[in-house]
């Protein structure tokens, strides 16, 4: 499906989306490890542009994730 928009998807369980941009479901009490490692912004915030962060923890997560 290459149309703009679409249904939200679960970001940490298969089947994973192959779209470049996805609308993901976010539960306030639970944030997947990949979102915590890559500085996912809070769902209560609206940001026009986020600051760029690169940390060693991000590289370790990618090397050790299944």
Image (cartoon, rainbow, N blue to C red):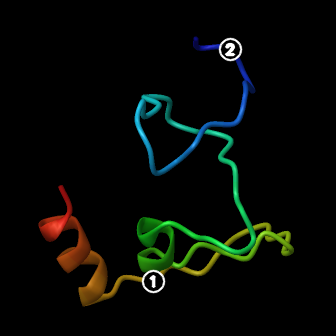
Toward the left, the furthest residue is 63
Toward the front, the furthest residue is 29
State the residue position of label 1: 53
Please tell me in which quadrant of the rendered image residue 23 appears: top right
Q: Position of residue 66 (x, y in %)?
A: 18, 55
Residue at 36% across, 82% down: 54
Vertical placement of 57 versus 34: above or below?
below
Q: Position of residue 7 (x, y in %)?
A: 73, 27
Q: Nearer the viewer, residue 49 or 62?
A: 62
Circle 1 sits in a helix, a strand or a loop, which is it? loop
32 vs 64, left or right, is: right
Q: Nearer the viewer, residue 35 or 27?
A: 27
Position of the N terminus by quadrant: top right
Q: Residues within 10 Å of mark 2 (few under 14, many from 20)?
A: few
Q: Position of residue 11 (x, y in %)?
A: 52, 48
Vertical placement of 35 versus 66: above or below?
below
Vertical placement of 24 versus 35: above or below?
above
Q: Earlier in the sequence, mark 1 or mark 2?
A: 2
Disc sitting over residue 25 in the figure: none
Please tell me in which quadrant of the rendered image residue 38 appears: bottom left
State the residue position of label 2: 3
Circle 2 sits in a helix, a strand or a loop, which is it? loop
Residue at 58% across, 70% down: 31
Q: Position of residue 29 (x, y in %)?
A: 70, 75
Q: Nearer the viewer, residue 48 or 29?
A: 29
4 vs 22, left or right, is: right
Q: Residues within 10 Å of mark 1 (few under 14, many from 20)?
A: few
Q: Nearer the viewer, residue 19 or 36?
A: 36
User: What is the C-alpha distance between the residues marked 1 and 2?
Assistant: 31 Å
């Amino acid at each position: 499906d290459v149309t703009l928009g679409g249904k939200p998807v679960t970001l940490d369980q298969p089947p994973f989306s192959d779209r470049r941009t996805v609308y993901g479901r976010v539960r306030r009490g639970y944030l997947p490890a990949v979102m915590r490692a890559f500085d996912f912004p809070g769902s209560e915030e609206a940001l026009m542009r986020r600051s760029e962060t690169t940390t060693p923890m991000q590289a370790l997560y990618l090397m050790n994730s299944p």
